[in-house]
Image (spheres, helix red, strand yellow):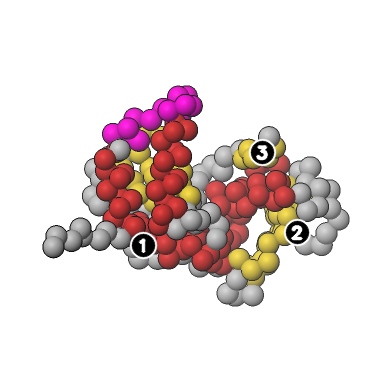
Amino acid sequence: MFKIPFLRPEKQFWAWFIRHESQLFSLRVDLSEQREHIFEELAARLRKVDPDLVFEFGPSKPKREFVISAGGIKRVFPSVASLVGSAPPLDRWQITAFRPRRTPVSTVEFNGKTVDPKDAQFTLASNGKTAGIRLFIPGHPEAASDLRQIGYLLLDEALGEYDVESYFGPIEMVSTESDTAGQRYPFAELPHKFDELVAPTQQPGLGRL
């Protein structure tokens, strides 16, 4: 009796990706209907690997970046590593594990709210193994979930998803008007200050492939 060979979810995902590679590479951000359809299918394929995997696309330059992210959930890190590690050679693509650092950090928009990193500040402390941060976000009412999410997106942009989840202990988001102790620094100084406290991540096989 003929048996159909079983493919692991990672292999199934990349087989689908290769079949749609040209469409994904040439996708333009202004074609919303086309983008929404293929992105929904891509997200569904990722969920078969792990329900919490998410993705981002960069521009074509000439390679196009495809970021596979854990969405800030540390449990999902092995799934990111496994999926990126099983990626086939793709001449036109740069496959990136976890949201990388971005320079400069972009303005973040989420659910109709916008925060420019130039308006944010931080205080930073370390016990030698993990860092603690208090992030001051303009117009941030305490416990505002949308602006808290914006805070995490800013941190991922500045430091990269892997370092934020691996090296931070307490993370607190408060309003810039809050009266708190500790020296505040402009958000643009965060990568330098962080690297002074915590050694930069060196993970063989992860990051840009």
Placement of 41 over or under 203, stated as above or below? above
Name the residue that disc number 3 marks. 111
C-alpha separation, residue under disc 3 versus residue under disc 1: 31 Å
Residue 186, given in percent of the width and then of the height, sits at 68, 49
Residues tagged 2 and 1 counted as in contact (Cβ below 8 A): no
- Regarding mark 3 in the picture, which secondary structure is present there? loop
Task: Pick out the residue farthest to the right.
Answer: 179
The quarter of the displayed image where residue 114 is located: top right
Three-letter code for the amino acid on which mark 2 is drawn: Gln
Q: Which residues are magenta?
A: 22-34
Number of numbered discs visible in the structure rendering:
3
Q: Which residue is mark 1?
A: 82
- Determine the CA span between mark 2 and mark 3: 31 Å
**Residue 206 visible at all:** no
Q: Could you tell me the amino acid type at mark 3?
A: Asn
Q: Secondary structure at mark 2?
A: loop
Q: Which residue is mark 2?
A: 183
- 120 and 3: which one is in front? 3
Disc 2 versus disc 3: nearer the observer? 3
Q: How many neighbours does mark 2 have within 10 angstroms: few (below 14), some (14-19), or many (20 or more)? A: few
**Crowding near pointer 3: few (<14 within 10 Å), some, many (20+)?**
few
Q: Residue furthest top?
A: 30
Question: Mark 3 or mark 1: which comes first in sequence?
Answer: 1
